[in-house]
Image (tube, grey):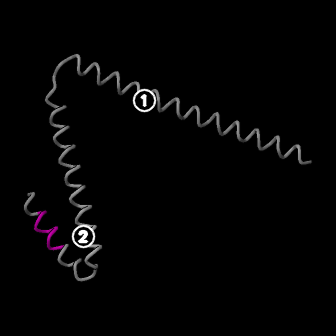
Amino acid sequence: MYKETEKQLSQGEKLDENVIGAEEMEKRQDQIAKMRSLLFYHELRAKRIKKIKSKAFRKHLKKAQSKSAENEEQDEEMLQEEREKRELERINARMSLR
């Protein structure tokens, strides 16, 4: 499957070479190589994490996820408070102009 997609990708690149300049093609190849390496890294990391079966690791992972979810909620609350604060300041500024 991987080789088939590789062949299709190389055929697509050959078609693009006719339209795109050499510098742009080199940038594109660098970008594709970077994305492939990142994908490979994430696949390896996911496999490693999937293998871990210990209760302690699962507990640690669950705690970290709940903490990040809590931080997101706090961020949303802080954004809402900031919006309200700016709105009140704007209203006060407009009232002082009259």
Q: Does residue 97 appear left or right of residue 82 in this picture?
A: right
Secondary structure under the numbered disc 2 in the rendered image: helix
Residue 56 sits in quarter: top left
Give the CA separation, mark 2 to mark 1: 40 Å
Q: Label 1 is placed on what type of residue?
A: Ala
**Is residue 30 positioned above or below 80 on the image?**
below
Q: Residue at x 46, y 26 (%)?
A: 70
As rendered, which of 31 and 51 lies closer to the eye?
31
**Is residue 76 positioned above or below 90 on the image?**
above
Q: Which mark is residue 69?
A: 1
Q: Label 2 is placed on what type of residue?
A: Glu
Q: Which mark is residue 26?
A: 2
Q: Residue at x 23, y 77 (%)?
A: 16
Secondary structure under the numbered disc 1 in the rendered image: helix
What type of secondary structure mainly makes up the magenta span?
helix
Q: Are marks 2 and 1 in contact (CB under 8 Å)?
A: no
